[in-house]
């Protein structure tokens, strides 16, 4: 396939990605405003245990349930007092709300008697850090976000225009929750989702010089007849790499405003860029046409959001990225971000994401989405003691890399590094072999799949 035809196909695919609106997605919601005594719910087929966990979390009550008591919660109401709300949520189960001497109330849920409610319910631990006064809204074609924002008393602080997706900011959490309840029944709204915070990954640490591998040694060559491979690096801003390595960096993009980086140390994005180039060197013997497109989703902020990550992905794909590296993540499962990833994946763009740097099995997103190749970190051929080993993780790679900044060596460690190594190997493989994406994925899974490693057993 010649380069002109590939560019033509890409030109056809990207507008198709951006023009389609996200489908309507709806999750069970329970908004419990104790101070205002206003409870709103839209729950269809919810598990009793999950609803009680949410109540315990929202109220601070000690919640006890009779062992074996069961009920499928299906209720939809708005701004009811808590007594009425409990009746509708608990159906034919009995309950008693009892004050105690330490000002903590206790809710007993039972079928037979109060004394039978002996099982303490742990408060619900919401995955991810919701930005309480924000919402992500996707509108259907023809709808006007500015008019809608005015009616809701919100400010539009982010736009992905061709997706009809917008980031709305409200004066407080209560206003955001009230707006979400209104949006649920608005025929112009395809999706109303929370916006979640994603902390910036940790920057690399300094090393003592001596006995370390040198910086990557690469020569930029023209692309083959299948076109240039471009890795979209969705991360913090990337600083100059020095030497001829800067020729492998395309003009950076930012969706989060100007960055304010410490000029004396490498940023996380800088470390990931050099890590990618090091693995490309290993795959191509130092001659490659692969380039990196840095996309800054953090700016000067200590965290980004699921909206900005989705925006960064779209900007990268629009600019020609055909491999994506997401060395970031959180526990927040965002329907909006997932929908963007599904659309990108349908365009045959491989996505690599970090599994997380805690030795748990908790899903981390976007790595846990099925369209994404989740990468954990290995140490000595086994999953590193700090790395996530959840069932969503499919790949493992070394979790350490030496990078150079201003001629000083630094070490990068974590599943972020493992992800950068893997995406660089994937791009380098396709560049060296001229194989397609499916052949690359087969190669990656055969050589880095956890089922082939001792750590998987």
Image: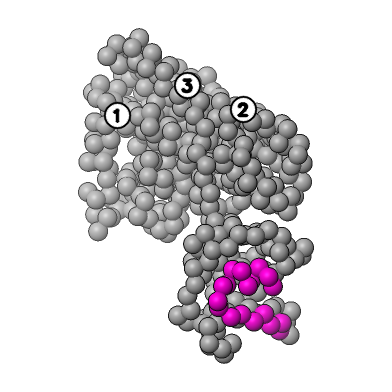
Q: Position of residue 297 (x, y in %)?
A: 57, 34
Q: Does residue 188 appear to the left or right of 152 in the view shown? A: left
Q: Is residue 133 placed above or below 216 in the rendered structure?
A: below
Which residues are drawn in magenta? 83-100
Question: Marks 1 and 2: in contact by CB < 8 Å?
Answer: no
Q: Position of residue 95 (x, y in %)?
A: 61, 80
Question: Marks 3 and 2: in contact by CB < 8 Å?
Answer: no
Mark 2 or 1 closer to N-term? 2
Q: Secondary structure at mark 3?
A: helix
Residue displayed at 28% across by 35% down: 441
How packed is label 1: few (under 14 Cα within 10 Å), some, or many (20 or more)?
A: some
* Foreground pick, 82 / 12: 82
Q: Does residue 306 appear to the left or right of 323 in the view shown? A: right
Mark 3 or 1 closer to N-term? 3
Which residue, given by chain and number where applicable, does mark 1 sit on?
437
Mark identifier at residue 142 = 2
Q: Find the distance from the CA under tag 3 to the CA under tag 1.
A: 21 Å
Taking the magenta stretch, the answer to whether it contains residue 197 is no
Residue displayed at 32% across by 45% down: 395
Which residue, given by chain and number where applicable, does mark 3 sit on?
15
Residue displayed at 62% across by 37% down: 188
């Amino acid at each position: 396939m010649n380069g002109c035809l590939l560019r033509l196909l890409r030109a056809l695919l990207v507008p198709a990605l951006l023009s389609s609106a996200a489908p309507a997605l709806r999750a069970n919601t329970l908004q419990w405003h104790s101070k205002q005594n206003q409870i709103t719910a839209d729950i269809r087929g919810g598990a009793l245990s999950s609803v009680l966990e949410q109540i315990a979390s929202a109220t601070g009550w000690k919640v006890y349930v009779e062992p074996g008591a069961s009920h499928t919660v299906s209720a939809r109401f708005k701004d009811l007092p808590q007594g009425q709300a409990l009746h509708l949520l608990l159906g034919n189960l009995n309950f008693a709300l009892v004050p105690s001497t330490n000002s903590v109330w206790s809710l007993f849920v039972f079928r037979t008697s109060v004394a039978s409610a002996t099982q303490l319910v742990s408060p619900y631990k919401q995955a991810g850090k919701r930005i309480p006064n924000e919402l992500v809204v996707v509108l259907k074609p023809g709808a006007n976000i500015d008019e809608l924002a005015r009616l809701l008393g919100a400010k539009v602080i982010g736009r992905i225009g061709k997706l009809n997706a917008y980031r709305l900011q409200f004066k407080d959490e209560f206003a955001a929750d009230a707006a979400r309840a209104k949006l649920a029944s608005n025929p112009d709204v395809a999706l109303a989702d929370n916006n979640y915070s994603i902390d910036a990954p940790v920057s690399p640490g300094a090393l003592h010089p001596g006995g370390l591998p040198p910086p990557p040694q690469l020569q930029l060559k023209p692309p083959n007849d299948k076109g240039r491979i471009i890795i979209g690096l969705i991360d913090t801003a990337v600083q100059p790499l020095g030497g001829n390595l800067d020729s492998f960096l395309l003009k950076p993009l930012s969706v989060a405003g100007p960055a304010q980086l410490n000029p004396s140390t490498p940023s996380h994005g800088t470390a990931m860029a050099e890590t990618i180039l090091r693995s490309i060197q290993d795959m191509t013997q130092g001659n490659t046409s692969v380039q990196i497109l840095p996309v800054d989703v953090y700016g000067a902020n200590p965290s980004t959001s699921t909206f900005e990550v989705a925006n960064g992905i779209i900007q990268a794909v629009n600019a020609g990225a055909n491999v994506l590296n997401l060395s970031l993540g959180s526990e927040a499962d965002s329907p909006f971000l997932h929908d963007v990833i599904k659309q990108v994946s349908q365009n045959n763009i491989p996505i690599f994401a970090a599994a997380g740097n805690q030795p748990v099995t908790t899903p981390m997103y976007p790595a846990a989405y099925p369209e994404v190749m989740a990468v954990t970190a290995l140490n000595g051929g086994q999953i590193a003691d700090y790395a996530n080993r959840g069932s969503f993780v499919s790949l493992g790679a070394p979790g350490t890399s030496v990078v150079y900044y201003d001629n000083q060596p630094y070490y990068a460690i974590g599943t972020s590094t493992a992800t950068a190594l893997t995406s660089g190997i994937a791009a380098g493989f396709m560049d060296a072999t001229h194989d397609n994406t499916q052949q690359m994925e087969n190669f990656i899974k055969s050589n880095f799949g956890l089922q082939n490693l001792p750590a998987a057993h």
